[in-house]
Image (spheres, rainbow, N blue to C red):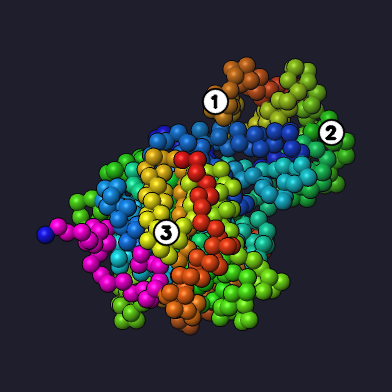
Amino acid sequence: MSLKIIFSGFGGQGVLMMGYVLAYAGMNEDKHVTFLPAYGAEVRGGTANCTVVVSDEEIASPIASSPEFVVAMNYPSMVKYQNMVKSGGTMFLNSDLITERPAREDINLVLVPVNTLAHDMGADRSLNMVMLGAVREVTNMVSENSVLGAIETVLEGKKKKLVETNQNAISVGSEFIRQSK
Amino acid sequence: MSAKTLMRGTHVLGEAAIRAGCRAYFGYPITPQNELPEYMASKFAKMDDAVFIQAESEIASINMVIGAAAAGARAMTSSSSPGISLKQEGISYLAAMELPAVIVNMMRGGPGLGNIAPAQGDYFQATRGGGHGDYRVIVLAPAYGQEIADMTRQAFDLADYYRTPVMILGDGMMGQMMEPVLFPEPVDPSSLPKKEWVVNGSKGRGSRVILSLLLDPPREEEHNWKLARKYQAITETIPDQEMYLTDDAELVVVAYGTAARIAKGAVHRVRQSGLKVGLYRPKTLWPFPSKPLAKLCDHVGQFLVFEMSTGQMVEDVRLAVEGRREVSFYGRPGGVVSTPEEVAAIVSSAYHGKSN
Amino acid sequence: MKKIFSRPDALKDNPFHYCPGCGHSIIHRLVAEVIDELGIRDRTIGVPPAGCAVLAYNYFDVDMCEAPHGRAAAVATGMKRILKDSVVFTYQGDGDIAAIGTAETIHAANRGERITAIFVNNAVYGMTGGQMAPTTLPGQETTTTPGGRLQVRDGYPLDLSGMLALAAGSVYIERTAVTSPKGIIRTKKAIKKAFETQLEDKGFSLVEVLSPCPTNWKMSPKDSIRWVDEIMTKIFPLKVIKDVA
């Protein structure tokens, strides 16, 4: 199985971190992974995006032209990627910032109020990990334990509190999905 | 660091270089490869025996490589397309003076200033020498993170063994992309074979000269033939390629580097619709792996070359095939990155065009 | 019998190919004498230029590595950084160091590279046949300044040594001339001090030597010497330009 996901949003929302943690978690499960950040002119103007592929086989192309999943953390990202999502795929929207909805009937929508959820747990900046928790819960691309472990590795050398906050944010995201079911 | 680690291509290259015993890096900032000099700067700052200089220009940095290589160090520089143009003078001298060095080109869109998106427009420049005079540069073309690590080690070994500059030809995307990598054990530079030709002060021996000036035409001719024999030996020894699903293929896509990964994605797709399509991926661009490609003519009906350029490697494919099979071309220059779907559609129509 | 004159160890037993009256042979000899006197022949590496002295490795009996035209300072930088205990010098003409190699030279000086540059200024491109150099004087006739160097067309002589003195990494810079016994002694002292500056790990050092080129100036050796002393030194005065060693 090979799953592709695009994370997008504006700078400061921790978009690259989401992809990096997911890719790390996949690697820790001995899966094939690629993490492709947008760079240069594409990211000028404050937008950021990255593509992650998690696969059981060798990954041919790291580029996701029709990804199974797209995460849009702001409105411009939804507009940019709404037509790319594979039919039957899922789009995750930060419903705190995005009030519009994609004009497509053939994809699933998962609305996560990540700003609110992060604020409520007292960690505004952890909105990215809240979203990643939700994404993981829905997609099952990797296990929750792998993600928690990946956060520890990725934030190695940082304060223990920061690691814990990010890990908690993952749980907040998954819990939100479980509650919504 | 024996477990796998997730690193971007530029960092993989830097780490692999250090593990290959590289102790001299000279460079000049240019996107999209700045993370490589930054990596070398941060690592070398903690190493007593390593030299990092951010030079005043690409020209200066390749000449610092000349100096460090002549002094016996495993030396490297890196840049992206416009910067590599500036280095060509020095690369010609390295070849002429028979100095080992590793040059990295993370290609971007061109010509001119172009852009900073991934492209493959420097194939001719890399494989035809690039600078003045009758010489060649070994060109390695990785496509995967792990291959970047392995080929970087190989590049330093080949450079030393043949006393010749080796280029690692990647592109902007490859430099940015992260993949899991398992690094080889580090080499202790002092354990490497002793170089009996370096200039390091003439203690206990006669003085030596490393030069490229041979005013007497017969001597220059002799030197040219000596280099030619070396290039011939390299051509007979190191060509390498990946052949993917070519055994039963009626059409084979030929692509290298990032384009080869996109092409592989395309091959997956068309195979699902039952098309007998394979991929031929040169891992060495010079010397070009011609023989296995020519051999494919025995059962492959046609070749489709896919490059992120307007068509450069396609010439080498045509030379290898020698007119025995049709060779078509599909390219996206200028930093446009094709999708596997797009290439699959091209492959599919070429396939049906031929068999219908 | 007492031997009072012999070839320095740092020179090979090859006759110089330089033109009669040219300063290169004298300057070669001075550099070799200094290398002998400092006892550094087996740890010295020279980087010759493209120019009349391109064949300097036929004369210096030390390790040498050629550099592309103008790039000697960069090649020397790479070398010296790897071989910290070596003594690395470049030997460059005015076109090499002050035109095509300006950037490499200024930045090597600014980094305070522990190298020594011997800069031979004869106000003309010698090997290529007498074209205008960056140091060609106003009004000076060359093959590419017919009627003389004209400021509005050809610009002004470049004071590279003065520019290098402004770089914080340069430590010792002196301009001398090999046109008299006194000047030759002065030049040797300067070269020695420049090498000592490097040996003492202080920074970048350079000696600019004004040197006659009778062939391209189309003058007799005697007139060439007079031209250096009376005309050239007006634009390029002999002096210690910087000494913070």
How would you rate the neighbour count of disc 1 (Cα within 10 Å): few for under 14, some for 14-19, many for 20 or more? few
Q: How far apart are marks 2 and 1 (CA)?
A: 31 Å
User: Which one is in front in this view, the residue at disc 3 or the one at disc 1?
Assistant: 3
The mark total stands at 3
How would you rate the neighbour count of disc 2 (Cα within 10 Å): few for under 14, some for 14-19, many for 20 or more? some
Name the secondary structure under disc 2: loop
Residue of label 1: A156
Q: What residue type is labelled 1?
A: Glu
Q: Please check the rendered image and state whether residue B292 is part of the magenta-colored stretch, yes or no.
A: no
Q: Is residue C156 left or right of residue B10?
A: right
Q: Which amino acid does label 3 sit on?
A: Gly
Q: Where A169 sits versus A24, above or below?
A: above
Viewer-proximal residue among B133 and A131: B133
Which range is magenta? C2-26
Residue for point 73% across, 25% down: A125
Q: Distance between the residues labelled 3 and 1?
A: 66 Å
Residue of label 2: A97
In the picture as drawn, the residue positioned furthest to the right comes out as: A99
User: Which one is in front in this view, the residue at disc 2 or the one at disc 1?
Assistant: 1
How would you rate the neighbour count of disc 3 (Cα within 10 Å): few for under 14, some for 14-19, many for 20 or more? some
Q: Where A151 sits versus B76, above or below?
A: above
Please tell me the numbered disc located at residue C85.
Answer: none
Residue of label 3: C183
Question: Do the residues marked 2 and 3 share a common chain?
Answer: no
Quick check: can you spot residue C3? yes
Q: Distance between the residues labelled 2 and 3?
A: 80 Å
Give residue A43's position: percent from left, percent from top. 72, 46
